[in-house]
Amino acid sequence: MTATAPAPPPARVRAAAVLPRLALVLAALLALLFAAAGPASAHAALTASDPGEGAVVATAPAQVTLSFSEKVALGEDSIRVLDPRGKRVDTGEIRDMCSGSTIRYGTALHPGLPDGTYTVAWQAVSADSHPIAGAFTFSIGAPSETTVALPERQAGGGPVGAAYGLARYAAYAGFTVLVGACAFILACWRRGAAVRPMQKLVLRAWVVLTAATLAMLVLRHPYTGSGNFADVFDLAGLKAVLATKTGAALVSRLLLLGAAALFIAVLFGAFARRQATAPEGGAGAAETAADEQDGKEDSRDAADLFFGLAVAGSVFAAGIAATWALSEHASTGLQNGIAMPVDVLHLLAAAAWLGGLTALLVALYTVPEVEREAVRRFSRIAFAGVVVLVATGAYQSWRQLGSWQALTGTSYGRLLIIKGALVAVLVGVAYLSRRWTARLGEAPAVDAAADVPAPAAVPGAVAAVPGAVSRETSTETGVSRETSTAAADVPGDPERAAQLARQRAARENALRRQARDADPARVGLRRSVLAEAAVAVAVLAVTTVLTSTEPGRVVAQEAGRNGASAPAVPNRAVKITLPFDTGGVNGKGSVRLELDPGRTGSNTLHVWAESPDGAPLDLPEVKVAFTLPAKEVGPLPASPDRAGPGHWSAPGVQLPLAGEWRIDVTVRTSEIDQTTVQKTVKIG
């Protein structure tokens, strides 16, 4: 038999008491996470360039090429090459040089470029919808002064980035509540379709999701481009956005939301009317002894309507979830054919759990007649959602991290740890909620005001005790009809009538609170669900931050590239001095070798030869070779050209890997006298 607590305070009074606390918790958590998240990070990485960063090449290259870790979208102005005075020297034509798994783009340079330092500035959009940008320099002949300042604004940052990020948070929150609340009504508490607070919750979630999607669509062009709000009105930019994968996903989401509006209209129209007229103890069929045949027909109609809503709701929910899966993390990287449906399941499970939890919280605080069986049904659905979340989340974590080191060594991994800890706390609080659910209905509720048992057998019944408030109480104004009548009894004194109305309302509200809190199981359930919802908000916020954080695999690729360019000694070139003796006349001396910047990638080699007294020694020939024995790489020959008396140099010496490199220097002092000296140095 269903236990029903005594009548609660009016909806507006109760909402006014609890909603400020919920809003405060939500605002504090979102503010904290926004402050920590910063601008959206890139999910594609620049893995190589030619010329390389900081390289000094002997002659002007014909083109500049960039290689990326995943597919990117580039516009006509995505790669710009500027000379030392800031004049553009590229042709502006982007060349697609991709082949197989190699993602490479380039732009041609004007011929006959003079010596000096050139700046390459690039900007693109990664395949998972996030903007990326960067800049580096290379030199022709020798480095020079340059008037070009490298861009300081991070891609996707600034006020536009913050607004776009806020819209992303709102979209995830709106989707979670919309899908979860509808699922809660259909699967757990069908009578809730006729309850005003539940209708408001679903409608507001739909409005939030729709508004956030529209905001993301119009902000997309400035977000991935200039970063100026004025570009929102650039119709050409909006047209370009619609041609992208992300633009198509956002438009598809809007179309699905338009169709979902019809689903909501039927849910809160025909379906709600059937549930409002059905007996509360049933599952929606009105079967009476007087007219059994009509009851069976009504039951079949109600079952058909429920089936149609369940199918349509599932299709809409999966379709909206797919707009994220098709345009973000799941659509790129490893096993995207598996990752996308897994991502859809992950989003639906999260919505069923966290959105249903929100609906349950609203029901517990605004509607006293929530049956014990409805809470039990949600408990089972939430448990299934947790199982799906753990399974799909484990797969996604493996796919995005790539290694155990990335779990603690990257921001993405650390956020996953935080999310896992919050989910563990959430499961613990949910366990407490299940215990309170089990206690519901074990004993009839006791009216605290009259100290007599309240009728617990009839769902929706009101405590028949002195001072109890009937269902005729207005849930919108918080003043009963009895109060209105009392106020009308003082026709000549409006002020006295208002005072009486306030006193009567205060007394009735106090009685309602006493009656509501007479059932300790229901009070405990409300509190545990409130705590559960607060933790769920944190989980949702951390999840949203994860979608704009570089996955561990990408960070590892970037670390490989950046680590390859890290000097063995910070900000210092590798310098060694080797004595030699060829055995002939004037065969003794030393060679001084400098490798700048002394890192993997491109280096500039300088060799000086000196006699024993320190004077420059002009030798007939000097050769250098580099060998990495641990990797069986080399010898890699370098033939420096004579730069002056006793001085040889070679730009663009490439050392592909980090490790202990052996440097062999061959010195020839005559036609027949030569020797080779060597030394091992650490590179990278």
Image: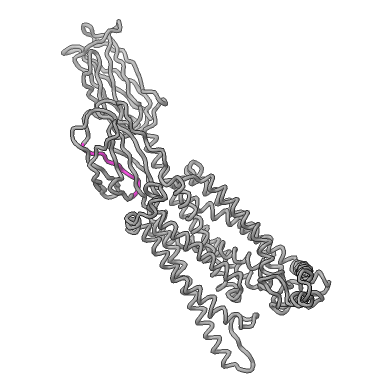
Residue furthest to the left in view is 671
- Quarter holding the C terminus is top left
Residue furthest to the right in view is 451
Instruction: Confirm whether the magenta stretch covers residue 66.
Output: yes
Q: How is the image coloured?
A: one colour
Residue 169 in the figure: left or right of residue 24: left
When the figure is inspected, residue 503 is found, relative to residue 153, above or below; the finding is below
Residue 94 appears at what percent x and percent y?
25, 46
When the figure is inspected, residue 462 is found, relative to residue 286, above or below; the finding is above
Residue 407 appears at what percent x and percent y?
50, 45
Residue 269 or residue 317, whichever sits in front: 269
Instruction: Confirm whether the magenta stretch covers residue 35.
Output: no
Visible residue check, residue 198? yes
Residue 640 or residue 589, whichever sits in front: 640
| Residue extent of the magenta highlight | 62-71
- Quarter of the image where one finds residue 669: top left
